[in-house]
Image (cartoon, rainbow, N blue to C red):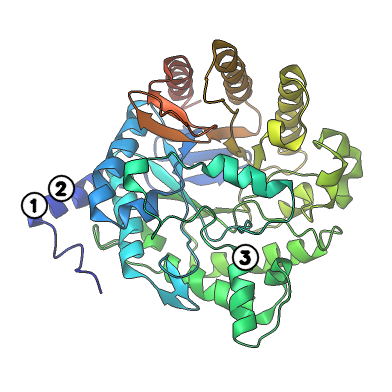
Amino acid sequence: MAQSVKEGLEPAILLLLQIAGSSMVAAQGFVTRSGTSFYDANGRFIVQGCNFYPAMSLASNSNNRPQVANLLATASSLGLNVVRTWAFGDGPGQLQTAPGQYNEQWFQGLDYVIAQAAQNNLRVILPFVNNWSRNCPDRSDALVLLKDGVNFLLTSLSSSNFRSNYGGKDRYVQWSQQARAGGSNPDDFYSNDYTRDLYRKFVSAVINRQNTFTGIYYKNDPTIFAWELMNEPRCESDPSGDTLQNWLQEMASYVKSIDGNHLLSTGTEGFYGPSTTARHFLNPGGWAANTGEDWMRNHRIDQIDFATFHSYPDQWMGGTIDDQLAFLANWTRGHVYDGSADRLNKPVVMGEFGAPMSSQRTQDEFSNRNRFFQIVYQSVLNGGANAGVIFWQLNVAQNVPQSPNKYAVYCPADSSTVNIISQQSAAVRGRRCK
């Protein structure tokens, strides 16, 4: 077992982290929701965030922690207030190395991320498991590979601890098979007794974790903005949506039974399913209604506090950039409308969005990406149930690598997009108490 983080730190440094975590975020209290808005002690809270998915795995190696700290400090300097990052890793050398067995080094990496987020006045959204696995059978696998990229902090990633998918529901089913508890395909994760019990045990281990930097139990830490039940849940083996709906209901009830402090959402992509056929025109294609997701129904669950959706029109529909931008505007407008007081009556958050760039990173590509960001950001400023957005993803680089992550925003290198992000942060702060 690795040396305790507390034992490896100078007492004065640990004390500073504890003070920072308690004085900045803790003073603002837990984020709550009322109707279609979020609130903390300072008033209305609008999510202005970025994704930084590998933070825990990177921070599990103390040599990488300066890069993690630098990225979180950069996010704060841009005026961001939320970072979404994985709280899972299923398989050898990851967070859950085997069923019910946890890697303390990785857990301490997550401890570090949360402590550093608090120090930088950031909150975190933490999903518990991934839908995707390395053997995804359809276009979604390409989406994962493109989004996850291979260039993020190249000097910090090693083949021994980096996983593009961090295990996922498929790993749970493999474990069930090894235990002779059944399961034949990844979607059995949602209905198999063994995998459901194992998921609940993992969720409990995370929620009841005591941070080795701050001493605060996760369930009592206001740095955590919200939990997500899964990253982008789908169940294509049951397009009726019943299997996924039952799982979301069961696990939402469980999470709320052991943590009444934090907000909870689904982590869904936003596809309209069988219960809302009149909304199918908003989907990126006919296939989207058959993913097992049923967005309106999924978010009517009482224990789900806010609705999430994502947007990757380049992967979902192809077409011209103008087609994709038109889809983006309608997709966003439709979900915000459906969150309104006379429909879901819950805040709506775009938990991932991004526009790809080639390795040439031409001016046209920058222009198109900036238009993408402007459409998304303007929707937040338009108000209604839009409670904020989280782009995919922030990287720190003075110069863009030769083979850049297609969806990454490099700060400060991508100055035009970085400026749009900073301007949006200022606009959001101006509406803080409205």
Q: Quadrant of residue 247?
A: bottom right
- Mark 2 belongs to which amino acid? Leu
- Mark 3 belongs to which amino acid? Lys
Given the current orientation, which residue lies at the most extreme bottom position? 180
Secondary structure found at label 2: helix
Q: Marks 3/1: CA distance?
A: 41 Å
Q: Residue at x 37, y 40 (%)?
A: 153
Apparent side of residue 325 relative to residue 198 in the rendered image (left or right): right
Secondary structure found at label 1: helix
Residue 313 point in image, percent of width and height: 71, 32
Q: Marks 3/2: CA distance?
A: 38 Å
Q: Residues within 10 Å of mark 2 (few under 14, many from 20)?
A: few
Apparent side of residue 206 relative to residue 108 in the rendered image (left or right): right
- Mark 1 belongs to which amino acid? Ala
Q: Nearer the viewer, mark 3 or mark 1?
A: 3
Residue 271 to residue 126: above or below = above
Q: Nearer the viewer, mark 3 or mark 2?
A: 3
Badge 1 is on which residue?
12
- Mark 2 vs 1: CB contact within 8 A: yes
Residue 270 to residue 204: above or below = above
Secondary structure found at label 3: helix
Q: Marks 2/1: CA distance?
A: 6 Å
Apparent side of residue 399 relative to residue 425 in the rendered image (left or right): left
* Residue 25 shows up from this direction: no
Residue 165 point in image, percent of width and height: 54, 55
- Name the mark on residue 169: 3
